[in-house]
Amino acid sequence: MASFQLRQFHFFKREGLEDLPEAFKQSELLMASNGGDLIFLADSTGHIHIVNRAFVVRSFLATSEASGTRITQMLHIHQARTLLTVEENVTAAGSRPVIKLWAVDRLLRQGDTQPVAVKYQQPSSTPYPLTAVAATPSISQIALGFAGGHIVLVRGNILKSRSTKQRTIHVAPEPITNLHFVTDAVGTSVTLYATSTAQTMAFDTTGSKSEPSILEERGCGIGCSLVNEDDELIVARDEAIYFYTTDGRGPCFAFDAPKVLLRRFKHYLLLATAAPSTMAPALANPAEHSPSLEPAGAKIYSYNDATTFTILDTRNKLVAYTGVVAGGVRGVATEWGSVFVLGGHGSLDFFSEKDLLEKLDILYRQNLYPLAVKMAQNGSYDLASVAGIYKRYGDWLYAKDDFDTAMSQYIQTIGFVEPSYVIRKYLDAQRLGNLTSYLQELHTAGMATSDHTTLLLNCYTKLRDEERLNQFIHTQEDYQFDVDTAIHVCRQAGFYEQALYLADKFSKTGMYLKLRVEDQDDIKSALEYMRKLGDTDILAYLAEFGRRCLSSLPRETTELLVDVCIKGMDARAAAAAAAGKGDTDQ
């Protein structure tokens, strides 16, 4: 895959939070949040700490008193206002995970009493630890992934501890690394996305059968996938970020760096990347661990002082922030419209997004106007404000004598920037070709005046661009310009056929005959045209042009005059006869 360098900016402000509560300084913290206005922390002693916006902490013991029991997984299911924890006591005999479901509202009301959770325990032990967990928004399904490569699906009224059933829906030698549920709007269709170290899969868990659909014979590491607001699975691998639906792999976004964590915030992807370690860390107690969670021959990545935190804007194809987090990234929470990053040395960094005006100012200073336009459009800027950016871009290009590209930007300002601003620039620069393009677009948008039409036709005639002149006058549907002006300009420039076309189309009879007689000396065509007119009009125009017509074609002119007179005499005779008949009848 071709690699390219993304533009990097600091579109987020980073602040280190001081005087943190003691809960943030515990070792081996798990961190969870899901838009519920709370951050949850779980420490190695089995305590859960609930942090509100004011950073007031409420703590309680969430595990049993058994030695070695600890919380290994934690999810905040915002829609159900429920916190899911997984409690494990991994020994040489294996592990028997205990799922606990905590009602968040009840936790906040408990006071000093010990909270009570709904429990679900695996019926039997497994020799492999739990590596991934997911739940549907209604908690009617919970999926458990293990380092041994199998996935267990639990279904039923789990919150009530009734009618729950479980079955193994997948068995493979590779460890499961991530699980994510996706449900439709009414919750009738449920899909489980799963990744292992070797595969990316999707399961339809709506019915009794859950056959896997292999999306790709490649997986990812723990914490390196998520589901976005469009229900797409996003997988972060070292060379790129991939997007999947149940139909297979979609687009990808090249970003070459070893990934150890993937989260999202709005339309941003939050990435933690680390340098490869020279060797895998030694296992203190092999009984407590599964087979390696990386494929054979793969590099082992670790959290270390070189861990980099990156905010990636895939919509605008740029890096919105990048910086080093001391001690590695232990957790990421997105709450209260901001991003919180928990560092390995007990630090907590707060990232707030700069407003759009600040971002655009950064781009203006670097003359990155196309990116500014794209960002403004994606940021729901109103059309007038976007047009203002196009104007700035056009002015910058014009100052660099890049008149063609500048005009492309000015055209985008039609309807928002006074046309005279652009017209004056290009008249002064004698860039009639560019000016013609602008005036054409002005007419297409219905924003042209008769002065603009006059100027456009003058441009055509001065450029001797008969093709575009013909196209302009022949393809107009509503002719939103002053026809008399257009005829006059064409006549003055010697484009008589175009002037005749307009005069004929819009029944400008006097002008048509002037063009035929005075400009083209085409008396024959003028006389033929007169024969289509009424007798009164013929006599009026013969009175105006008769001398020229008699001088050039005396016989044809006399015949026309005689025909008109005879028709007039016949008409008068018929009228007299009708009047006489009326008197006789009386």
Image (cartoon, helix red, strand yellow):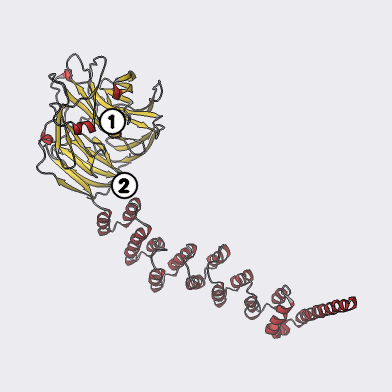
Mark 1 residue type = Cys
**Residue 132 visible in the displayed image:** yes
**Front residue of 513 and 151:** 151
Classify residue 293 by image quadrant: top left
Q: Residues within 10 Å of mark 2 (few under 14, many from 20)?
A: some
- Residue ranking furthest to the front: 586
Q: Position of residue 51 (x, y in %)?
A: 17, 37
Local crowd size for mark 1, using a 10 Å CA cut-off: few (<14), some (14–19), many (≥20): many
Determine which residue is flagged by label 1. 220
x and y percentages locating residue 348 in the rendered image: 15, 40
Q: Is residue 424 above or below residue 127?
A: below
Observer-nearest residue: 461 or 540?
540
Q: Which residue is mark 2?
A: 317
Looking at this rendering, what residue extends furthest in the right direction? 584
Query: Count the marks: how many?
Result: 2
Please, what is the three-letter code of the amino acid marked with disc 2? Lys
Label 1 residue SS: loop
Q: Earlier in the sequence, mark 2 or mark 1?
A: 1
The residue positioned 28% from the left and 54% from the top of the image is 356
* The image quarter in which residue 153 lies: top left
Look at the numbered disc 2 and give the secondary structure of its residue: loop
Name the residue rendered at 31%, 55% in the picture.
372
Looking at the image, residue 362 lies above or below residue 69? below
* 229 relative to 479 in the view: left or right: left
Determine which of the numbered discs, if any, sits on residue 406 in the image: none
Residue 321 appears at what percent x and percent y? 22, 46
The picture places residue 195, in percent across and down from the top left corner, at 31, 28
Which part of the image, by quadrant, shows the N terminus? top left
Disc 2 versus disc 1: distance between alpha carbons? 23 Å
Residue 30 at least partly seen: no
Front-most of 48 and 346? 48
